[in-house]
Structures are given as structure tokens and as C-alpha cells.
Amino acid sequence: MNKQPPCPCGSGKTYAICCAPLHQGRPAASAEALMRSRYCAYVLMLETYLRATWDAATCPGDLALSTEPRPKWTGLEIRAYQEAGDTAKVEFIARYKLGGRAHRLHEVSRFRRQDERWIYVDGEFAA
């Protein structure tokens, strides 16, 4: 039996039923689902998807996904999720290795629903 590997986002589901449908255009059901799919997009270097799910007013001109040395993303932990109408916050820790050293990115990200789709607005580093 050919077992598919788990999705990089850490949901425990396979990529084919977790983040792949979002990467192929299906709207995320929640800001948390969008957060997971965006982490997965960083792992898979899907710049087009990242830009499509980022608020145009805050999206940087260069995402530098191919800049060397590239991080090796090693895990995502969702710490908290808050939704209030058309806005949401997701606190997460993303782990990665760079140059053989382990690092972590701890952020509280802000999202908003626009035209029935969640988009990433911005984030603040958490302590």
C-alpha cells in the first residue's frame, strides 16, 4: 500500500486532502487553515500562492524565497486562534534550520476576510 506523507503544516492529514486544495484555489474555511496553508507554501516555495493570500497593501515586493541559504522548515505549532467576524488572529511558532542551526519564528498574525476569502494582513513577533 502506498501511504502518502503527512502535510508539512502538521495537521496530521495528507497534503492531498489538507493544503493542496487550498494551493489549487479552494478558499480556506478559517484563518487558521489559511495560516497552515501559507506555512506549507513556504515549505514548498509557492510564491504565487503566498502573494495571492497576502493583503496587497502589506505584501513585500520580494519574498526572497530562493535567496541562499534557504531555511529548511521543520514544523508548525499553532498556539492560539481567535476569530471575530471578518478578522482573526493566529499565534504560531514555525521552526526551521538555517546553516545547521535551529531557529523559531514566534508570531501573532492578523487576517481578514475579503470577498469571502481569508487573507493574511501582517504579523508581530511575539516574545
Image (cartoon, helix red, strand yellow):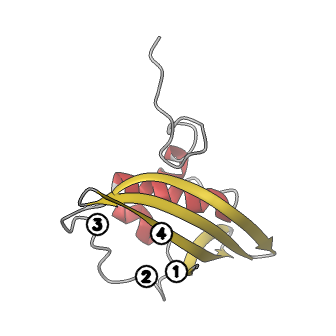
Measured in 3D between alpha carbons, the distance from the residue under mark 1 to the one under mark 2, in whole angstroms, is 6 Å
| Name of the residue lying farthest toward the top | 1
- Give the residue displayed 20% in from the left and 69% down from the top: 67
Q: Nearer the viewer, residue 93 or 83?
A: 93
20 displayed left or right of 87 = left
Amino acid under disc 1: Asp
Q: Nearer the viewer, residue 116 or 47?
A: 47
How packed is label 3: few (under 14 Cα within 10 Å), some, or many (20 or more)?
Answer: some
Measured in 3D between alpha carbons, the distance from the residue under mark 1 to the one under mark 4, in whole angstroms, is 20 Å
Looking at marks 3 and 1 on the same chain, the residue that comes earlier in the sequence is marked by 1
59 displayed left or right of 101 = right
Comparing labels 4 and 3, the label whose residue is closer to the camera: 4
Q: Nearer the viewer, residue 39 or 76?
A: 76
Amino acid under disc 2: Cys
Q: Nearer the viewer, residue 37 or 114?
A: 37
Whole-percent x and y of residue 17?
A: 57, 37
Q: Which residue is mark 1?
A: 55
Q: Which residue is mark 2?
A: 59
Is residue 115 shown to the viewer in this render?
yes
Rendered position, 18 above or below 80:
above
Question: Do residues under tags 2 and 4 come within 8 Å of each other at their CB atoms?
Answer: no
| Name of the residue lying farthest toward the left | 68
- Give the residue displayed 58% in from the left and 72% down from the top: 119
Q: Which residue is mark 3?
A: 65
73 displayed left or right of 62 = right
